[in-house]
Amino acid sequence: MLQHSANLDLAFQALADPARRGMLERLTLGPASVSELARPFDMSLSAIVQHLKVLEAGGLVRTEKVGRVRTCQIEPAALSAAEGWINQRRTTWERHFDRLEQYLDDTADESANTEPKP
Amino acid sequence: MTDRSVTHATFCIERTLSAAPARVFKAFADQSAKDVWFVGPPGWVRTERSMDFRVGGRETSSVGERGGVQHRFDATYHDIVPNERIVFTYAMHLDAVLMSVSITTIELVAIGDKTKLKFTEQGAFLDGVDFAANREQGTQYLLDAVEAWLAREGANG
């Protein structure tokens, strides 16, 4: 899944909202109906449904309609520990390279003084 | 906890760095340079460090919060082409739990007076024993990753 960075971008975009992160955190405790999910939030049911659609598009949440109740649950593949771990690895290297860029900028002057220009 | 699994995945990171390949290569090859940027997040301390930058040589680094979980990086260099390419394998442990074993390729390509750095990691990412038990922890890592991603997007925008 991670090979497809577009998927990852959608997942990250889905998470770039505090309400959606709150919904996701609620779902890590177990499945919930849409109205249960909406309860802590001061927003309309249709706004909640919109947020759910974004979370679904990001591959983070799966919803299923049983009778008249739509049940939401975490998409296990998206939030598996292994996937989380891979994301952490990537983030760690990104952070290293941020610092590498900073280091190269900081030492640009001394290198200009000590290394002859080609 | 007997639930064990493995995920195979590849990820790439590309950066264009404002320095010639020789300077970028030196930042990877020279320990005093690498120690400046290859560090844990702010507030973390390094409890172990070694670096033997040659084919067959090893590099180790353990970082973590003081008294907290130790993140241990243990690498072996397999291919070194000065100013062009570095290939190494590395294992990551959280305390005693093996989390992943990866092969990592760093390619440097000169673009004018800059360098395109292409980092590719192919790994077997293991569900550590304690890790698999805690779905919320997986979520937390994802949320942390999002924060970092947002910070970068903001910086680029």
Image (cartoon, rainbow, N blue to C red):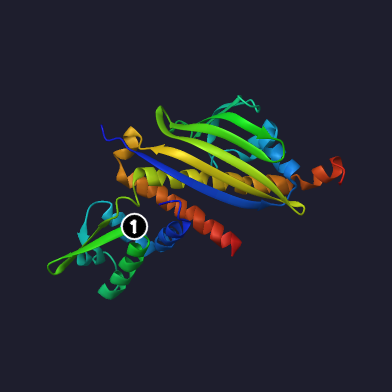
Residue B20 in the image, given as x and y percentages of width and height: 75, 47
Q: Secondary structure at mark 1?
A: loop
The residue shown at (62%, 52%) is: B15
Question: In which quarter of the view is residue B68 placed?
Answer: top left
Crowd tier of the residue under label 1, counting other residues whose Cα lies within 10 Å: few below 14, some 14–19, many 20 or above: many
The residue shown at (48%, 45%) is: B10
Question: In which quarter of the view is residue A55 placed?
Answer: bottom left
Q: Quadrant where the N terminus of chain B lies? A: top left
Q: Is B78 located above or below residue B8 in the figure?
A: above
Horizontally, residue A75 falls left or right of residue A18, namely: left
Residue under circle 1?
A60
Residue B97 in the image, given as x and y percentages of width and height: 39, 30
> Which subunit holds the residue at mark 1?
A
Which residue is more in the foreground, A94 or B89? B89
- The amino acid type found where label 1 is placed reads Leu
Horizontally, residue B58 falls left or right of residue A8, namely: right
Residue A23 in the image, given as x and y percentages of width and height: 31, 60
Horizontally, residue B76 falls left or right of residue A42, namely: right
Q: Quadrant where the C terminus of chain B lies? A: bottom right
The image shows a total of numbered marks equal to 1
Question: In which quarter of the view is residue A4 placed?
Answer: bottom left
The residue shown at (73%, 44%) is: B21
Residue B69 in the image, given as x and y percentages of width and height: 43, 33
